[in-house]
Protein backbone atom coordinates (compact mmCIF):
# COMPACT_ATOMS: atom_id res chain seq x y z
CA UNK A 1 0.00 0.00 0.00
CA UNK A 2 1.23 3.50 -0.73
CA UNK A 3 1.66 5.88 2.19
CA UNK A 4 -0.44 9.06 2.54
CA UNK A 5 1.91 10.86 0.15
CA UNK A 6 1.72 8.16 -2.56
CA UNK A 7 5.07 6.57 -1.78
CA UNK A 8 6.49 3.81 0.34
CA UNK A 9 9.43 2.84 2.51
CA UNK A 10 12.45 0.57 2.58
CA UNK A 11 14.91 -0.25 5.35
CA UNK A 12 17.04 2.75 4.29
CA UNK A 13 14.51 5.46 3.38
CA UNK A 14 10.91 6.62 3.03
CA UNK A 15 9.69 8.17 -0.20
CA UNK A 16 6.80 10.26 -1.46
CA UNK A 17 5.74 11.35 -4.92
CA UNK A 18 3.58 13.56 -7.08
CA UNK A 19 3.19 13.13 -10.81
CA UNK A 20 6.17 15.50 -11.27
CA UNK A 21 8.63 14.59 -8.53
CA UNK A 22 9.87 12.05 -5.99
CA UNK A 23 11.24 12.82 -2.52
CA UNK A 24 13.55 10.34 -0.80
CA UNK A 25 13.60 11.01 2.96
CA UNK A 26 16.41 9.54 5.08
CA UNK A 27 16.66 9.83 8.87
CA UNK A 28 20.26 10.56 9.81
CA UNK A 29 22.05 11.18 13.12
CA UNK A 30 21.95 14.76 14.41
CA UNK A 31 25.76 14.87 14.41
CA UNK A 32 26.04 14.38 10.63
CA UNK A 33 26.85 17.53 8.68
CA UNK A 34 26.32 18.24 4.98
CA UNK A 35 30.03 17.81 4.28
CA UNK A 36 29.71 14.20 5.54
CA UNK A 37 27.12 13.35 2.85
CA UNK A 38 27.69 12.49 -0.79
CA UNK A 39 24.69 12.17 -3.08
CA UNK A 40 25.55 11.33 -6.68
CA UNK A 41 22.42 11.89 -8.80
CA UNK A 42 22.52 10.85 -12.45
CA UNK A 43 19.73 10.51 -15.03
CA UNK A 44 19.16 6.82 -14.30
CA UNK A 45 21.21 6.14 -11.15
CA UNK A 46 21.77 7.33 -7.58
CA UNK A 47 24.44 6.65 -4.96
CA UNK A 48 24.17 7.89 -1.36
CA UNK A 49 27.13 7.81 1.08
CA UNK A 50 26.91 9.04 4.66
CA UNK A 51 30.09 9.37 6.73
CA UNK A 52 32.00 7.52 3.98
CA UNK A 53 29.72 4.47 4.08
CA UNK A 54 27.42 3.46 1.24
CA UNK A 55 23.80 3.75 2.37
CA UNK A 56 22.28 2.64 -0.94
CA UNK A 57 22.89 2.70 -4.67
CA UNK A 58 20.82 1.72 -7.67
CA UNK A 59 19.00 2.51 -10.87
CA UNK A 60 15.89 4.67 -10.80
CA UNK A 61 12.51 3.23 -11.76
CA UNK A 62 12.55 5.77 -14.63
CA UNK A 63 14.73 8.63 -15.86
CA UNK A 64 14.90 11.89 -13.95
CA UNK A 65 15.92 15.45 -14.85
CA UNK A 66 19.31 15.83 -13.15
CA UNK A 67 19.56 19.63 -13.49
CA UNK A 68 16.31 20.10 -11.55
CA UNK A 69 17.03 17.52 -8.84
CA UNK A 70 18.78 18.34 -5.56
CA UNK A 71 19.25 17.34 -1.96
CA UNK A 72 18.93 19.26 1.29
CA UNK A 73 19.60 18.56 4.94
CA UNK A 74 16.70 19.59 7.19
CA UNK A 75 15.99 19.45 10.92
CA UNK A 76 12.39 18.81 11.98
CA UNK A 77 11.21 18.29 15.55
CA UNK A 78 14.67 17.30 16.76
CA UNK A 79 15.30 14.90 13.84
CA UNK A 80 17.70 15.40 10.96
CA UNK A 81 16.41 14.42 7.50
CA UNK A 82 18.26 14.12 4.22
CA UNK A 83 15.66 15.09 1.59
CA UNK A 84 16.56 14.11 -1.99
CA UNK A 85 14.20 15.81 -4.44
CA UNK A 86 14.10 14.12 -7.87
CA UNK A 87 12.29 15.69 -10.80
CA UNK A 88 10.67 13.00 -12.94
CA UNK A 89 11.41 13.00 -16.66
CA UNK A 90 9.18 15.69 -18.26
CA UNK A 91 5.83 14.85 -19.82
CA UNK A 92 5.86 11.22 -18.62
CA UNK A 93 3.34 11.98 -15.83
CA UNK A 94 2.59 8.68 -14.12
CA UNK A 95 3.13 7.03 -10.75
CA UNK A 96 6.29 5.12 -9.90
CA UNK A 97 5.84 1.82 -8.06
CA UNK A 98 9.32 2.11 -6.50
CA UNK A 99 12.21 4.58 -6.54
CA UNK A 100 15.07 2.13 -7.13
CA UNK A 101 14.63 -0.93 -9.32
CA UNK A 102 14.55 -4.03 -7.13
CA UNK A 103 13.44 -2.16 -3.98
CA UNK A 104 10.08 -2.58 -2.24
CA UNK A 105 7.17 -1.77 -4.58
CA UNK A 106 3.81 -0.16 -3.88
CA UNK A 107 0.49 -0.85 -5.62
CA UNK A 108 0.01 2.27 -7.76
CA UNK A 109 -3.66 1.34 -8.30
CA UNK A 110 -4.23 2.23 -4.63
CA UNK A 111 -2.81 5.76 -4.97
CA UNK A 112 -5.14 8.59 -4.02
CA UNK A 113 -4.01 11.46 -6.27
CA UNK A 114 -4.19 15.03 -5.08
CA UNK A 115 -6.91 17.17 -6.59
CA UNK A 116 -5.83 19.79 -9.05
CA UNK A 117 -7.34 22.32 -11.39
CA UNK A 118 -6.76 23.00 -15.06
CA UNK A 119 -4.94 26.15 -14.02
CA UNK A 120 -2.22 23.94 -12.46
CA UNK A 121 -1.32 22.44 -15.84
CA UNK A 122 1.45 23.72 -18.08
CA UNK A 123 0.58 25.67 -21.23
CA UNK A 124 1.19 22.69 -23.52
CA UNK A 125 -0.97 20.22 -21.60
CA UNK A 126 -3.87 22.55 -20.77
CA UNK A 127 -5.47 22.60 -24.30
CA UNK A 128 -5.28 18.80 -24.53
CA UNK A 129 -7.07 18.33 -21.21
CA UNK A 130 -9.67 20.97 -22.05
CA UNK A 131 -10.39 19.20 -25.36
CA UNK A 132 -10.72 15.85 -23.60
CA UNK A 133 -13.15 17.36 -21.08
CA UNK A 134 -15.19 18.95 -23.90
CA UNK A 135 -15.30 15.65 -25.80
CA UNK A 136 -16.46 13.80 -22.68
CA UNK A 137 -19.38 16.22 -22.23
Image (tube, rainbow, N blue to C red):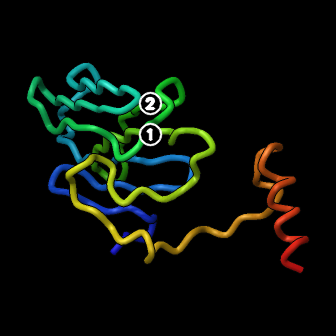
Q: Is residue 74 above or below residue 15?
A: above
Q: Is residue 41 above or below residue 108?
A: above
Q: Quadrant of residue 3?
A: bottom left
Answer with left or right where residue 51 lies relative to residue 35: left
Name the image quarter holding the C terminus: bottom right
| Residue 5 percent across, percent down from the top left | 45, 64
Q: Secondary structure at mark 2?
A: strand
Task: From the viewer's side, name the closer residue of 53 and 62.
Answer: 62
Name the residue beneath numbered marker 2.
70
Q: Calculate the distance from the C-alpha at mark 1 to the C-alpha at mark 2.
A: 5 Å
Residue under the image location 26 percent in, 48 percent down? 101
Answer with left or right where residue 36 lies relative to residue 2: left
Q: Residue furthest top?
A: 35
Task: From the viewer's side, name the closer residue of 37 and 29.
Answer: 37
Task: From the viewer's side, name the closer residue of 13 and 96.
Answer: 96
Q: Secondary structure at mark 1?
A: strand
Look at the numbered discs 1 and 2 and tell me whether their residues touch, using CB distance below 8 Å. Answer: yes
Q: Residue furthest bottom?
A: 137
Residue under the image location 44 percent in, 65 percent down? 6
Structural crowding at the residue carrying mark 1, measured as other residues with C-alpha within 10 Å and reported as few (<14), some (14–19) or many (≥20): some
Name the residue beneath numbered marker 1.
85
Amino acid sequence: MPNKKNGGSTDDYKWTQTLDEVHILIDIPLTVKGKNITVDIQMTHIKVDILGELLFEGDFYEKITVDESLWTLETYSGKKILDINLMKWPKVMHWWDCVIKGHQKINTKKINPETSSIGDLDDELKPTVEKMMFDMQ
